[in-house]
Image (cartoon, rainbow, N blue to C red):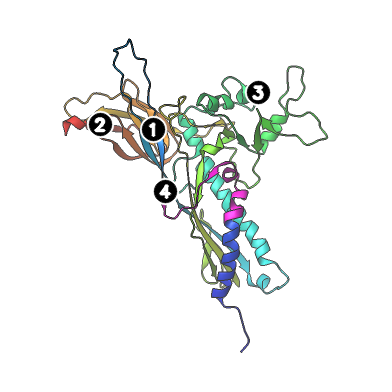
Amino acid sequence: MPNSISREAAEALIREQLVNTIFEDVPKQSIVMQLGRKLPNMTSKQTKIPVLDMLPISYWVNGDTGFKRTSRQEWDNVYLTAAELAVIVPIPEAVLSDSSFDIMGNVKPRVNEAMGQRVDSAILFGEGRPLEWQNDIVTVARQSGHNVSGEISYDSLLGADGVLSKVEQAGYTVDGVIASMQAKGAMRSIKDDAGRPIFVSDMQGATRYALDGAPMYFPENGCFNPSIAQMIVGNWKQLVYSIRQDITVKILDQGVIQDPETKEIVYNLAQQDMVALRVVMRLGWALPNPATRLNTDRSKVPFAYIEAKSPFTDYAATFTVQKQGGDSGKLEGAKINVNGAIKKTNSSGQAVFNLRNGTYPYSVKLNGYRPASGEITISSGAANPTVSLVAINQE
């Protein structure tokens, strides 16, 4: 009986090749993972990152016998949760039978590119964002007021209220810029008062794109959505990610492959004499955003963006926080965290978030009260949730 390679042996061989390249090459295919900070590989579904939530405060002491005041420092937990990302690569059996065709040489780049594109789209814009993940970069920047409207111009980039200034006002230095391919033309068209291009010094040489020393990246993997933003700037080292150690690889020869959106059958493996390579990996990311001297309440984030020419639609979610019980007075200074975006209530006990359609978990905290949590759903309209907090001395 002739020797043959079993399916189990083939899977083991391919898995060994793919697992190594995923850990090394997927981050190279993802702009966000290139710029972000990689943490050690996750060994469980969820990793807890303690972050500074309140800074200690110092005081002057009056006279020789003045009393020294006490202060406190608080910590909060940010959770980095691993979500599953799967890629299926269909391969005709006729191609497999051609021994001169380098299967792995062609499969690996496609797998890495597909995974990199999905990671970037979810983190930057929330497209296909797993429910376990926090809000995307654009959403958290929007809540901080770090959005700039209008065309790409000197003022919107480097002006006093431009995207770089938004990040700097939060206490961070911009170390990278991600923009759409269309932004290149907009950058080249910016001219000074004499009509000379600012970003183009030589029409025959390659243009070096940078903003105030921060390098610019124009993704070609299809991750950047120009209908949501034209450009995103920030301190990317504040963004952290981690990959789970378990990666599964399986060869399929039965079943159908459906389009995730339309549910239409794209391939019937048995009927079309095809096999499919399925790769599943899990990774998580987080924006810890610890308290700093310039961002004591963590309401600012180290990112800002220039809106699309036709800004996307979002809806106001007005939270009202009040005291539970007979005296249901409004509570000022309550910290509301809507899936990673943080605001404090005003003197009327209110805080307004601007959210796209979807369901968002939230938590509410205030010293002297028991924390509360829940979910808010935005469905093409405004929402007005009221949260009642129980005073600790009432229990």
Query: Mark 2: which secondary structure?
Result: loop
As shown in the figure, which amino acid type bears the numbered disc 1? Answer: Asp
Foreground label between 1 and 3: 1
Mark 4: which secondary structure? strand
Residue 386, percent from left and from top: 29, 32
**Residue extending farthest front:** 64
Observer able to see residue 209? yes
Residue 347 lies, in percent from the top left, at 32, 20
Structural distance between the alpha carbons of marks 1 and 4: 18 Å
Q: Earlier in the sequence, mark 2 or mark 3?
A: 3
Question: Residue reaching furthest top?
Answer: 63
Mark 4 or mark 3: name the one nearer the start of the chain: 4
Q: Residue 47, labelled with which disc?
A: 4
Residue stretch in magenta: 23-48
Which of pointers 1 and 2 lies earlier in the amino acid sequence?
Answer: 1
CB within 8 Å, label 2 to label 3:
no
Please tell me which of labels 1 and 4 falls first in the chain: 4
Quadrant location of residue 356? Answer: top left
In the picture of the structure, the residue carrying the numbered disc 3 is 154
Residue at (68%, 70%) from the top-left corner? Answer: 95
Q: Residues within 10 Å of mark 2 (few under 14, many from 20)?
A: some
Along the viewing direction, whichever of 74 and 355 lies nearer the viewer: 74
> Magenta stretch: residue 30 in it?
yes
Vertical placement of residue 14 versus 292, above or below: below
Q: Separation of disc 2 and disc 4 at Cα?
A: 27 Å
Q: CA distance from mark 2 to mark 3?
A: 47 Å
For label 1, the residue is 53
